[in-house]
Image (cartoon, rainbow, N blue to C red):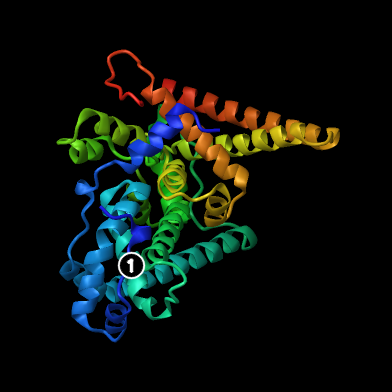
Amino acid sequence: MHTELEHGLARLLRALPEDGARPYDFGEFERRTREAPIAAARARRARILAVAIVVVLAIGAAAIRFGGGTHLPAPPAVPLAAGRAAALRPAVTADFGGDEADAQQWLESLPREPGVVRVGTRAAVESLEDHLAEVDDLMSSERAGPAAPARLAALQKERSQLVSSLVQVRYAETLADASR
Amino acid sequence: MTRLVEITVPQAVRERACAGEEGARQSIYAAVAPATFALIRRIIGNRSTAEDVFQDTMMSFFEHLADFREEAPLGAWLRQIAISRCLMHLRSPWRRARLYIEGSGATVATAEVESATRALPPEVIDVERALATLAPTARAVVWMYEVEGYSHAEIAHAFGRSVSFSKSQLARAHLKLRAWFEPQGNRPTCTLS
């Protein structure tokens, strides 16, 4: 179904100038080709390192899960009126085997503020909308073909779930925007 | 500029390039590189990423040049490699992870579009900007369908998705582009006639 826009669009897209999209010359291509094995080796080393980190983390997590927990000191109960340093001293001293300087160092190494990572919703929304469009398309095909009420009902149910997820993501997005 | 799919290279030049002759490789590069980069740039959007994908494409092209069987023009064969590399990039988990974290990586940066279109006539700038508002997947589908002449079945095959996926992506892109071209406030618009 081509409308006037689609015809015009194809024509305009084909007529777009390419002057701003010149690639680099052959000399540069050869230089980059020579450097490619070095970059690949670097990427391979980075991949190995990433895998090693994941393995160490997995072993650590397994040790925590099955080995009875960590040896980090439990957060002490801090009475507000008594003052932070005074309240910390007995608990921390006990857990660090009496080495107060180590405990102090460990406390200082902790971040002052919790790290906040803001995750965008665009990819989630895009994926949900894609899925929704596919379901819509399938429903149109089902309606055009021989009647299959069960299949149509299943698609309708899937569509409702997708719309519900999309609404939740949008709502979360609105809340996040409002809190900024 | 000649379309990539129409570019052919004499067999003798190809054979010399396969044998490692620098001059032959250079002349093939000069013939195919502009159209290849233009195609990749249109699909990827961002210039520096497009250069990485282009480099990867051309390296793969020269590496496998001896395997070319002349079943289609050389440009058509290269186009397949370029599009497959672009789609690999769009599907890459690193890119998707970046998209999740940055949240706004889907469209081409406005500054980049503006700098690339500074000297162009207004109607062309409008089309460039409209294209830049599309998500990379939608832009790839639009370009493959409208300009490269791929069918929905071919696009679906290239993406490893259903024909419905291709149709719905194209329909949604058209809706978005239609909204862009409809007059709204003071925004300069382009007339499609």
Q: In the image, is B169 to the left or to the right of A150?
A: left
Q: Position of residue B93 (x, y in %)?
A: 47, 55
Q: In the image, is A59 to the left or to the right of A144?
A: left
Q: How many marks?
A: 1
Res B54 quadrant in image: bottom left
Q: Position of residue B25 (x, y in %)?
A: 24, 76
How crowded pointer 1 is (Cα within 10 Å; few <14, some 14-19, many 20+) is rated as some
Q: Quadrant of the C terminus of chain A?
A: top left
Q: In the image, is B187 to the left or to the right of B167?
A: left
Look at the numbered disc 1 and give the secondary structure of its residue.
loop
- Residue placed most toward the observer, A7 or A96: A7
Residue shown at the point (25%, 38%) measured from the top left: B113
Q: Position of residue B51 (x, y in %)?
A: 27, 57
Q: Quadrant of the N terminus of chain A?
A: top right
The residue at which mark 1 appears reads as: B8
Res B189 quadrant in image: top left
A68 relative to B187, above or below: below
Residue shown at the point (41%, 40%) measured from the top left: A117
Q: Is residue B66 visible?
A: yes
B5 relative to B128, above or below: below
> Which of the chains bears the disc numbered 1?
B
Q: Is residue A157 visible?
A: no
Amino acid on which the number 1 mark rests in the picture: Thr
- Residue placed most toward the observer, B137 or B65: B65
- Residue placed most toward the observer, A145 or A165: A145
Q: Position of residue B59 (x, y in %)?
A: 32, 71
Task: Give the residue at the far top of this rendering.
Answer: B185
Residue shown at the point (42%, 57%) measured from the top left: B83
